[in-house]
Amino acid sequence: MPITYPLTPPSSPHPDARNVSLAPDAAVAESISPFTFQRQVQEHQGQRWILTVELPPMNRDDAEEWITFLLSLNGKAGTFLYGPPSSRIPRGNPVGTPLVNGVGQTGQDLATDGWTPNASGILLKGDMIQLGTGADAHLHKVLLGADADGSGEATLTLWPNLRTAPGDGDPIITSGAAGLFALMSNAMEWDVNVAIHHGISFAAQEAI
């Protein structure tokens, strides 16, 4: 059976039983004068997530699930879907059926509708949302809390910026949000101690 991407990581061990770092990486250039120390900053379009995962010690049965998952990615070639465990449940109360409201949206703000009218705190600072699915999945963090107005509309301020415009009426995933990632190295290592416990860690970058 041919391997098709994106892959979904194994669910064992429990997905929260690991150390996860999700770091924002922005393409911002800085120039500091060696004479006056005045600073000039140039913001470019590039924004992405950098992911590092350290799995807990595992027995061989669990470890082989992860080892074969990583091998199936064939280094940087393949992609997989991943969402940070700490952000799978929103802090806010995303009531309603949220949808993208309007075409041609790019940049930091996203117009949405479909929320329960006049609902407050539909999303709070730091909540994660997913736009798109499969190979088109994008993971965004909400920078400002949002309330729905009387028409069930709300504007979300996001990081990273919208790189491509989502379609009008596209669903907004507020629970279990995930993005598309690819490994940062073609080399993969795992170790086995005297108790036959396996140690696995890996680093990935958002696949744009």
Image (tube, grey):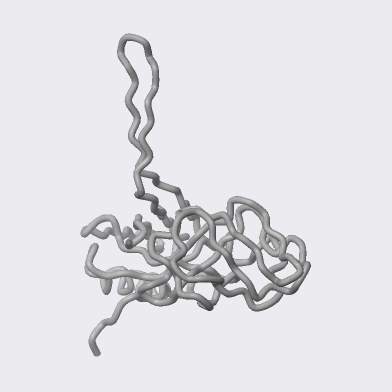
Task: Look at the picture and state if 147 lies above or below 79.
Answer: above
Task: Look at the picture and state if 121 lies above or below 170.
Answer: above
- Asked which quadrant contains residue 190, the reply is bottom left
Task: Tell me what residue is drawn at x 42 percent, y 57 percent.
Answer: 53
Task: Look at the picture and state if 4 lies above or below 139.
Answer: below
Q: Position of residue 169 (x, y in %)?
A: 53, 78
Q: Is residue 10 left or right of residue 44?
A: right
Q: Nearer the viewer, residue 18 or 147?
A: 147
Q: Position of residue 179 (x, y in %)?
A: 43, 66
Q: Is residue 182 left or right of residue 94?
A: left
Q: Quadrant of the N terminus?
A: bottom left
Q: Quadrant of the C terminus?
A: bottom left
Outermost residue, bottom side:
1
Q: Visible in this render: residue 194?
A: no
Q: Visible in this render: residue 74?
A: yes
Q: Is residue 204 left or right of residue 104?
A: left
Q: Position of residue 106 (x, y in %)?
A: 44, 60
- Asked which quadrant contains residue 65, the reply is bottom left
Task: Tell me what residue is drawn at x 32 percent, y 58 percent.
Answer: 191
Q: Nearer the viewer, residue 179 or 2?
A: 179
Q: Nearer the viewer, residue 194 or 27?
A: 27
Q: Position of residue 92 (x, y in %)?
A: 70, 62
Outermost residue, top side:
35
Task: Tell me what residue is drawn at x 22 percent, y 69 percent.
Answer: 74
